[in-house]
Image (spheres, rainbow, N blue to C red):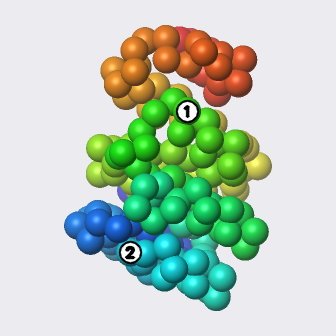
Amino acid sequence: MASESYLDGIKVLIVDDEVDILETLEDLLIMCNVVTASTFDEAKDLLESQPFDIAILDIMGVEGYELLDIANKQGITVVMLTAHALSPEDTMKSHKGGAASYIPKEEMANITTYLSDVLEAKEKGKDPWWRWFERFGDFFSNAFGPRWYEKDKSYWDRYMDPRA
């Protein structure tokens, strides 16, 4: 599978306060060297003491935005994964905060594709959000209405599919 080639052997930190989420992601990312943390303090210590290729951070329960800042300072690529902070506003906050992507937990079964998108973009010198609307536009339109992005249209225009 092409998406796995970008992930083979990379070191991934997964941070979530829900053990079942950690276990599921660990199972989905068997091609990676996975390290998990279930608390803010544990994650902070890991981010500040070990190198990671990518970090997957929950927002709620583990102070995800604060961890995003720490990871950015360490030069670690971050993907936000959330269920409870799922909103257009949190998507933009994640983007502006330096996250490479923002993934609804409902979509985590496809995590290898989404992480590969981010790593492929990095390799090719593209913005990591280059495929975000292609991957999640329908999901967000179903969740928030077909014109959810219009409030901040000028911001999101650069990521919109020109065919839409």
Horizontal arrangement in the rendering, residue 21 relative to residue 76 (left or right)? left
Look at 49% across and 17% down and name the residue there. 148
Q: Position of residue 21 (x, y in %)?
A: 29, 63
**96 or 115: nearer the eye?**
96
Q: Is the C-beta separation of discs 2 and 1 under 8 Å? A: no
Percent x, y of residue 151: 60, 15
Residue at the location (66% across, 82% down)?
Answer: 48
Q: Which amino acid type is shown beneath numbered disc 2?
A: Ser
* Circle number at residue 89: 1
**Residue 138: quarter of image:** top left
- The correct choice, above or below, for 63 with respect to 83 in the image is below
Crowd band around label 1 with a 10 angstrom C-alpha radius: few (<14), some (14–19), many (20+): few
Q: Secondary structure at mark 1?
A: helix
Of the numbered discs in the image, which one, if any, rests on residue 45? none
Identified at 75% across, 68% down, the residue is: 73
For the residues marked 2 and 1, what is the alpha-carbon distance in whole angstroms? 25 Å
Please identify the quarter of the rendering in which residue 119 is found: bottom right
Residue 85 place in picture, x, y as percent: 43, 43
Density class for disc 2 (Cα within 10 Å; few <14, some 14-19, many ≥20) is some
Give the residue displayed 65% in from the left and 24% down from the top.
156
Which amino acid type is marked by label 1? Glu
Res. 21 visible in picture: yes
Position of 94 relative to 69 (above/below): above
Foreground residue among 7 and 144: 144
Residue in the foreground of this view, choosing between 144 and 75 = 144
Give the position of the N terminus as an image quadrant: bottom left
Is residue 5 visible in this depiction of the protein? no
Image quadrant where residue 61 sits? bottom left
Residue topped by disc 2: 38
Residue at far bottom of view: 49
